[in-house]
Image: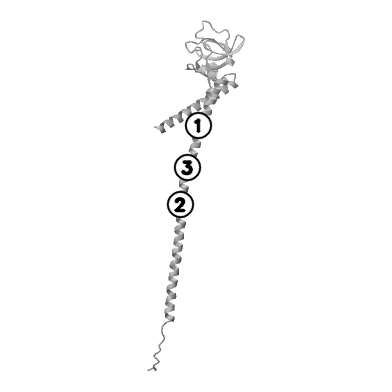
Amino acid sequence: MKKVLKIVVDVLSWIILAIALLVTILVFSSGRNNGVANLFGFIPMSVESDSMKPTFSQGDLIICREVDDVMQLQENDVITFWTIIEGKKVRNTHRIVAVNDAGSTRSFVTRGDNNPLDDETPVYGGDIIGKWTNTRLAGLGAVMNFLRTKTGFFICILIPMAIFFLIELYKFIVTLIEVKSSKAPELDEEEIKRRAIEEYLAAQKQNGGEDGSAEAAQPAADDTKEDTAPEDTSGGDPA
């Protein structure tokens, strides 16, 4: 059970880290591109008003995709584009209600699903940011807006990432200590074996020396007996 819990915690930690890294990439990407994040051609957008309600609402997160050819856009597509509202250049996401072709130039008439009138300014190809992919994540737009602030980035991104790396560092140190502890008995055992072999060889050498001394003593004793044998004193004449 403890092992399973550890695996679950590790998996959740890596998921949180992956999400934090993804959000970090999106935040920095949007900061370099006038607030428009782009991840492999996909563009997450925070909905800032209820002009498209009930299709999506303020605070939702929608996913758009880059448009390679504006000629492929048609009526009823939902597009995100740059426009001027109250003298400011802002992003807007509305539905195409009409397409105007004037030779090589194409423009689009747009209107919010919740608006009674068409937008005053037509949209040209150079103003288009992307086309909505029909993907909507309710409420996540407000979260993204909060993460773009310094406070939100610090609380939701930097702190979790710091905690994750501290946990991994702690696990690495514990593992290192365990490895060193497991190696210590092995070293002691090797030392014991080495000493036992040395003592055995020393004993064998000593026994070999004693056996050699005994063998050398035996011939010396025989030689002594031969030298001290009694002489013949009978004094008899030879026959």
Instruction: Say whether marks 1 and 2 touch (CB < 8 Å).
Output: no
- For the N terminus, the image quarter is top left
Q: Kindly state the secondary structure of the residue where label 1 is placed.
A: helix
Q: Kindly state the secondary structure of the residue where label 3 is placed.
A: helix
Q: How many C-alpha atoms fall within 10 Å of the one at disc 2: few (<14), some, or many (≥20)?
A: few
Q: Is residue 217 above or below residue 233?
A: above
**Could you tell me residue 146's position as x and y percent?**
54, 18
> In this orientation, does residue 40 appear?
no
**Could you tell me residue 25's position as x and y percent?**
55, 25
Instruction: Say whether marks 1 and 3 touch (CB < 8 Å).
Output: no
- Residue matched to label 1: 167
Among the two numbered marks 2 and 3 on one chain, the one whose residue lies closer to the N terminus:
3
Q: Camera-side residue: 212 or 56? A: 212
Say which residue appears at 48% left-offset and 27% top-offset.
Answer: 15
- Looking at the rendered structure, the kind of residue marked 1 is Ile
Q: How many C-alpha atoms fall within 10 Å of the one at disc 1: few (<14), some, or many (≥20)?
A: some
> In this orientation, does residue 215 appear?
yes
> Marks 1 and 2, Cα distance to the nearest angstrom?
39 Å
> Marks 2 and 3, Cα distance to the nearest angstrom?
18 Å
- Residue matched to label 3: 181
> Marks 1 and 3, Cα distance to the nearest angstrom?
21 Å
Q: Kindly state the secondary structure of the residue where label 2 is placed.
A: helix
Disc sitting over residue 204 in the figure: none
- Looking at the rendered structure, the kind of residue marked 3 is Ser
Say which residue appears at 47% left-offset and 57% top-offset.
Answer: 198
Q: Camera-side residue: 208 or 162? A: 208
- For the C terminus, the image quarter is bottom left
Q: Residue furthest right?
A: 87
Q: Is 101 displayed left or right of 231 in the figure?
A: right
